[in-house]
Amino acid sequence: MKTAIFLLLAILFSVDSVMRLRQGYFDLGVFLIYCATGLLWIYTVFHKQIDAWCSFGIGKILKLLFLFGICVMICLMAFIHFSGQRTPPDSTEKAMIVLGASVRNDTPSPSLKYRLDAAYEYAVKHPDIPVVVSGGQGADESRPEADVMAEYLINKGLSEERIWKEDKSQSTQENFLFSKELLEKHGITEKDPIVFVTNQFHCYRSEGYAKRAGFEKVHAIPAGMSSTSVLPVYLREVFAVLYFWCFA
């Protein structure tokens, strides 16, 4: 029974890996999925030898460490997910910051579209707050993300006068630092409440960077994401959060 379960998982992960290869997108989260696929196949083929080796001595210790690591990963992913819901907007915000993401062929990536759609929905309900679109130009992008984001929102019907562009940032940390400078030029200070928009997996770390940038009252709008991106982005975000805790 156990062998059949691992065989099924190996097949499912293999199909998923092939689909991701065809999409041509690669990052740490996708790499970890490839690694998991390989490990599943190795265990499926050599489970008898592996079980025997892991039943005593160093093998047993490594098995326990491996299982502990998986439990920690799952707990951290759950923490990241639910932390994205802890600071919802309360309509007191003086400005909204939309965090940039990758742009492909002058078109927002799926993750960025989710952010922009969530921002537009909130902006329509709160017509008095300005919308800062924050994102510079990546190495593989022909234009700053902020330009593409502004165009997307204008095409959806948002007034151009409400959109303020921050087009220099290259990281989440810079998103907030540079957006803060832009807001201060318009009389909005770090003491004023703000709301930012990003995908749910990204909310916890983004809130941390917002507070480190000096914002005192920060709320988050967690945008959705495509179902196929959930596993790799949360796997990747675990390591991003660990880096944030240890080094940022």
Image: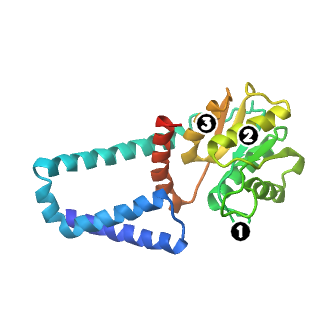
Q: Tag 1 or tag 2, which sits nearer the N-term?
A: 1
Q: Are marks 3 and 1 in contact (CB under 8 Å)?
A: no
| Mark 2 nearby-residue class (10 Å; few <14, some 14–19, many ≥20) | some
Q: Is residue 74 left or right of residue 162?
A: left
Task: Read off the residue under disc 2.
Answer: 178
Say if 105 sits above or below 85 in the image.
below
Q: Quadrant of the N terminus?
A: bottom left
User: Can I make out residue 222 in this image?
Assistant: no
| Mark 3 nearby-residue class (10 Å; few <14, some 14–19, many ≥20) | many
Residue situated furthest right in the rendering: 161
Q: Amino acid at mark 3?
A: Tyr
- For mark 2, give the secondary structure: helix
Q: Are marks 2 and 1 in contact (CB under 8 Å)?
A: no
* Residue 187 x/y as whole percent: 85, 30
Which residue is found at the position 18% from the left and 64% from the top? 47
Tag in front: 2 or 3: 2
Q: Amino acid at mark 2?
A: Phe
Q: Could you tell me how far apart the alpha carbons at marks 3 and 1 are, in whole angstroms?
A: 29 Å
Q: Amino acid at mark 1?
A: Asn
Task: Read off the residue under disc 1.
Answer: 105
Q: Is residue 2 left or right of residue 227?
A: left
Foreground: 147 or 161? 147
Q: Are marks 2 and 3 in contact (CB under 8 Å)?
A: no
Q: Could you tell me how far apart the alpha carbons at marks 2 and 3 are, in whole angstroms?
A: 12 Å
Q: Tag 1 or tag 3, which sits nearer the N-term?
A: 1
Which residue is found at the position 47% from the left and 57% from the top? 28
* Residue 205 x/y as whole percent: 56, 40
Task: Read off the residue under disc 3.
Answer: 209
Which residue is found at the position 38% from the left and 67% from the top? 13
Q: Could you tell me how far apart the alpha carbons at marks 2 and 1 are, in whole angstroms?
A: 25 Å
